[in-house]
Amino acid sequence: MPKKKTKRKRMQGKGTGIGNDINEAVKNDKLLIGSNMVFRNVKKGRLQSLIFASNLPEASRKELDNQASISGIERRDFEGDSAKLGEACGKPFNILLIGIKK
């Protein structure tokens, strides 16, 4: 008897609020990847939201929380680590932090 093929979930977060937001940001070219780029845009208040991987260093998280609260930027935690966040963004590398532009 042949085995039944099962569909696998390709990325964590797909179907959730964060996964949908990431997909929309990728489609509309509003996704910022990279700590330096995200930090710069947080300070200028150009971002709608920040998404942190679960393994983002605590010092970076505290600094971003402080700057984001001053600028009124939404902060969200991704359920997985940086490898899973990179996967969710459709990139073949680890991503600790992403920003979504306004």
Image (spheres, rainbow, N blue to C red):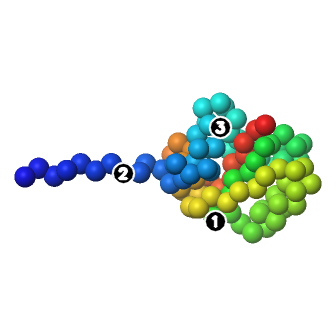
* Numbered label tally: 3
Which label was assigned to residue 55?
1
Give the position of the C terminus as an image quadrant.
top right
| Residue placed under numbered mark 2 in the picture | 8
How crowded is the residue under tag 2: few (<14 C-alpha within 10 Å), some, or many (20+)? few
Instruction: Give coordinates of residue 84: x percent, y percent.
Output: 53, 55
Instruction: Give coordinates of residue 4: x percent, y percent.
Output: 19, 50
Instruction: Give coordinates of residue 15: x percent, y percent.
Output: 52, 48
Can residue 87 be seen from the camera position used here? no
- Say which residue appears at 68% left-offset and 44% top-offset: 33
Image marks 2 and 1: residues in contact by CB distance under 8 Å: no
Can residue 51 be seen from the camera position used here? yes
Q: Residue furthest left?
A: 1
Q: Secondary structure at mark 1?
A: loop
| Residue placed under numbered mark 3 in the picture | 25
Distance of mark 2 from mark 1, alpha carbons?
Answer: 25 Å
Image marks 2 and 3: residues in contact by CB distance under 8 Å: no
